[in-house]
Image (spheres, helix red, strand yellow):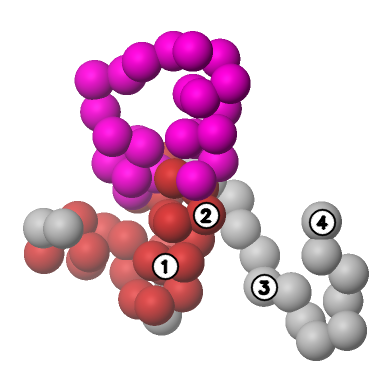
Amino acid sequence: MKIDEMEKILRGIDNRYEAIRVIAREARNINNILRFSGQELEEKPTTLAVNRLIEGKLEYRYVEPGEEQN
């Protein structure tokens, strides 16, 4: 990952490790959608997830202890 991309990511998420977790989860979701739809893209799912986070198209929230997850 390029340094300028990481700087853009850290504008939205303060913790870089949490940012990587958010990106990884989105990349897995994109990969699953592509696998079931049979589509092929020019970019990798991880690249798409990074771009979605940088562009503000990716929503996330912290789950408090004891709070139910979806």
Residue at position x 88%, y 69% in the image: 68
Query: Count of labels shown?
Result: 4
Task: Give the labeled residue for mark 4.
Answer: 70
Which stretch is magenta? 28-51
Per the picture, the main secondary structure of the magenta-coloured stretch is helix
* Dot 1 amino acid type: Ala
* Dot 3 amino acid type: Tyr
Instruction: Quote the CA–CA distance across marks 4 and 3.
Output: 12 Å
Q: Identify whether 53 is placed above or below 52.
A: below
Instruction: Quote the CA–CA distance across marks 2 and 3.
Output: 14 Å
Q: Which mark is residue 25?
A: 2
Q: Is residue 3 left or right of 47 when viewed as pictured?
A: left
Going from N to C along the chain, the mark reached first, 2 or 4, is 2
Task: Give the labeled residue for mark 3.
Answer: 62
Going from N to C along the chain, the mark reached first, 3 or 1, is 1
Q: Nearer the viewer, mark 4 or mark 3?
A: 4
Residue at position x 22%, y 64% in the image: 6
